[in-house]
Amino acid sequence: MSEYRLLLHIGLHKTATSSFQKNVLYALHVEGIINFLGGVRGEDSTFFYPFREVVDIDELAYGMKIERVSEIQNLLRGRLSSNKINVLSEELFTSSIHYNLEIIFSNLSRIFAFCDTKILVSLRSPVDMIFSRYVEHYPYIFYGDSDKDSFDKFANHLIENLEERGYLEFNYEKLLDKIDSFFSEKYVLLYEDLKLDKELYFKILSSLLARDADDIQRRFLSNVSNETKKTRIGASASVTPSQRILSKLKIYNMPLVRRNWLLRLVWRRVSRVLDYFRSEVFIEHVKPSKELASRLQAAVGVEDVETFSKRHNVNKNKLLCYRYAKKSS
């Protein structure tokens, strides 16, 4: 067994990740109970991310030479604890909209090869996940894309192009199999259990963090972070002037900008000026119709519930009840 124990939490997005990071992981780190490597990007300007001081996620998205992997490992050894559980939490590690996940997983498995690593991944009913994910990233990515500037357009594109690499995060069967090909020990949480089976949800977290389940539950639910703004017909998102430019010019996806810290810094400064003098625009997104939701479910739902349940240690009846399956029965 390795000297270092690592819990690597990799999302998914829109599964209460921000609350977990800030209310539980960061708080336990401050109290000296765990060694948290990040990340926290709080709405109150709290930023805590030691791991990014060693390697940026944009670098993880490209092939790494063995010399660079060794360099990162040596730097990490100075930040890891041998007598506490080390935790790294980053939902972008499963953001196929932004990154090639096979490269991300490969680099992470190589970097942490010297650790006793456990993977934690949180899933959410796929149609709900897709809608929330779209609303979240609309300002940065979809606002300026005429082929995807409404949820109906995006959903139809996803249905027709599900095999595209960028949609892997919505294909749970392939996503979890991909994770299993790089990591040997994985735990799966269902977002819906946070409301419908708190006992199991916090029992899993308790075993992974070696903390009392009631304590983790109290911390987790103490404050809700980064919640989607719901409306009567769906959800709303604000689009700032800088985000409109970002999306229209597709700056967010330019490798030169993503990999160059100086260009990112310049853009952040320009964004602050633009957003200070010009007001944001609020866009309301309508929930998918029953017909579109049904088509999405048929496209992204779990095909083989029995196998999925056994392979990933998830309750079959919950997969059906929470609408993870292509068919509800």
Image (tube, grey):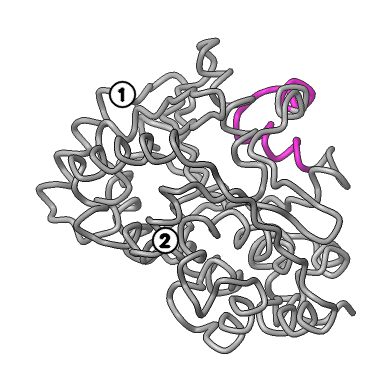
Residue named by callout 1: 79
Image location of residue 56, percent across then percent down: 28, 43
Apparent side of residue 203 relative to residue 243 in the rendered image (left or right): right
Image location of residue 184, percent across then percent down: 47, 56
Residue named by callout 2: 247
Apparent side of residue 112 relative to residue 184 in the rendered image (left or right): left
Residue type marked 2: Ser
Q: Residue at x 13, y 47 (%)?
A: 68
- Is 211 rendered above or below residue 105? above
Question: Distance from label 2 to label 1 (Cα)?
Answer: 36 Å
Which is more toward the observer, 272 or 41? Answer: 272
Apparent side of residue 266 relative to residue 293 in the rendered image (left or right): left
In this figure, what is the number of numbered marks? 2
Residue 311 appears in which quarter of the rendering?
A: bottom right
Q: Residue at x 58, y 52 (%)?
A: 13
Residue type marked 1: Arg
**Magenta span contains residue 141:** no
Numbered disc 1: secondary structure: loop
Which is more toward the observer, 183 or 280? Answer: 280
